[in-house]
């Protein structure tokens, strides 16, 4: 029996719901830790002799608060810690002025340092957020979402950025409607951040130029190869010249959506999902090396066009999907995870994969993931 996929998959919703609840409880515990430290300090002082100091508890409170709270809250917790020291002075039977001065000095200094750390942490967060927003805006300008409907095809796309600092990767996709059919490319350039955006602009721009005028998708891939080689040779850094290759897969859907031709340059093959049939990798012919390396190994040898039935879905994806690992190091397998599932809309498939990969990896995604779904009518 087919399990209905979609925006709300029961299995994933239950697992993600448990994960969200666990995260919520863990966050609540972390946020009350400063107050727990203050209470423990007071209790510890009441249960120990006067010459035993509870200052480590009071000093820990503002330190814990620094990365979790705002600056104002961190200052207030530091004042509370100082107030606890003075409160102990009032209720102690015997006390040394020197000990009191030492305790106050320790808590005040730690509180000030905590405020400085809080300010530094929030400034770094703001810079990273700003840099990431700029990079993502540039990426959206270079790689806008494709049309949702082109002829007999329905198309959906998604770019999932890895949560690592402010950098986005070089995953790319582009779709172009031509007199020869609907042509598209999906690939992965080397680099991170704005360097990756610049490289993506070159590859996507070259594809838009050749997609319209090339007589076949094989010729389009050959022109792309030349463009990537020119870009690699233009770079001055020797390391970039050696590693300036681009794994990519090209596809051309016929005007009626009943066939697709694939040219694979060292990229994970697309996945074909057809009603009533198990998922299978769509890699006809012989895959070649990534773009800019074909001069060493020869071009790919594509097979004949693959026939498509009405309602067939072709999933293109970058290695961010298949290289997502769980806590035991097991890679994500889209063929196994999509077995027996049916999806009403292309967007439902994207939503399922996004949630399922997050569930598989525990939210620790190390690489960007570009997804492109094409469904025939």
Image (cartoon, grey):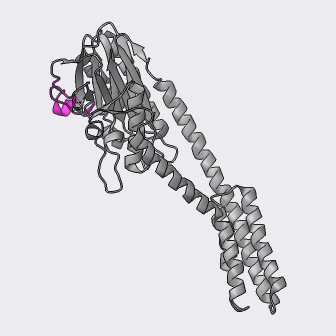
- Is 93 situated above or below 211? below
Say left or right for 168 vs 4.
right
Residue extending furthest front?
1
Assess whether residue 284 is covered by the magenta stretch: yes
Query: Which residue occupies 60% across, 49% down?
Result: 125
- The quarter in which the N terminus is drawn is top left
Residue 300 lies in the magenta-colored region? yes
Image height of 153 relative to 19, above or below: above
Please tell me whether residue 372 is drawn above or below residue 367 in the rendered image: above
In this picture, residue 302 sits left or right of residue 244: left
Please count the marks in the image: 0
Main secondary-structure element of the magenta-colored stretch? loop
User: Residue 51: which quarter of the image?
Assistant: bottom right
In this orientation, which residue lies closer to the viewer: 306 or 206?
A: 306
Q: Which residues are magenta?
A: 281-302
Q: Position of residue 262 (x, y in %)?
A: 23, 23
- Counting from the top left corner in percent of width and height, residue 282 is at 22, 28
Q: Position of residue 273 (x, y in %)?
A: 27, 27
Regarding residue 163, the answer to whether it shows in the image is yes
């Amino acid at each position: 029996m087919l399990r209905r996929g979609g925006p709300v998959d029961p299995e994933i919703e239950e697992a993600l719901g448990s994960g969200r609840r666990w995260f919520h409880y863990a966050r609540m515990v972390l946020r009350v830790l400063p107050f727990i430290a203050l209470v423990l300090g007071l209790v510890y002082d009441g249960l120990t002799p006067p010459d035993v100091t509870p200052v480590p508890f009071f000093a820990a409170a503002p330190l814990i608060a620094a990365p979790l709270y705002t600056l104002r809250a961190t200052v207030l917790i530091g004042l509370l810690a100082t107030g606890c020291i003075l409160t102990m002075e009032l209720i102690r039977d015997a006390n040394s002025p020197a000990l009191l001065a030492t305790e106050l000095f320790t808590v005040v200094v730690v509180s000030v340092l905590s405020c400085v750390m809080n300010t530094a942490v929030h400034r770094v967060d703001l810079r990273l957020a700003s840099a990431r927003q700029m990079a993502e805006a540039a990426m959206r300008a270079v790689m806008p979402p494709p049309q949702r409907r082109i002829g007999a095809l329905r198309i959906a796309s998604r770019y999932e950025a890895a949560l690592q600092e402010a950098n986005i990767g070089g995953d790319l996709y582009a779709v172009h409607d031509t007199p020869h059919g609907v042509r598209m490319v999906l690939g992965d350039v080397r680099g991170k951040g704005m360097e990756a955006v610049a490289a993506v602009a070159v590859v996507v721009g070259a594809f838009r130029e050749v997609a319209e005028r090339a007589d076949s998708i094989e010729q389009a891939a050959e022109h792309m190869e030349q463009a990537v080689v020119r870009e690699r040779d233009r770079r001055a850094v020797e390391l970039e010249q050696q590693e300036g290759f681009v794994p990519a897969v090209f596809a051309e859907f016929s005007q009626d959506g009943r066939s697709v031709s694939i040219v694979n340059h060292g990229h994970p093959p697309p996945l074909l999902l057809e009603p009533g049939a198990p998922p299978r990798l769509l890699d006809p012919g012989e895959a070649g090396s990534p773009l800019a390396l074909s001069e060493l190994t020869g071009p790919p040898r594509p097979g004949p066009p693959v026939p498509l039935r009405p309602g067939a879905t072709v999933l293109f994806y970058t290695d961010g999907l298949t290289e997502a690992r769980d806590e035991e190091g097991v890679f994500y397998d889209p063929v196994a995870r999509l077995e027996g599932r049916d999806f009403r809309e292309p967007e439902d498939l994207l939503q399922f994969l996004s949630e399922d990969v997050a569930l598989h990896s525990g939210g620790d995604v190390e690489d960007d993931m570009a997804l492109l779904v094409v469904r025939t009518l």
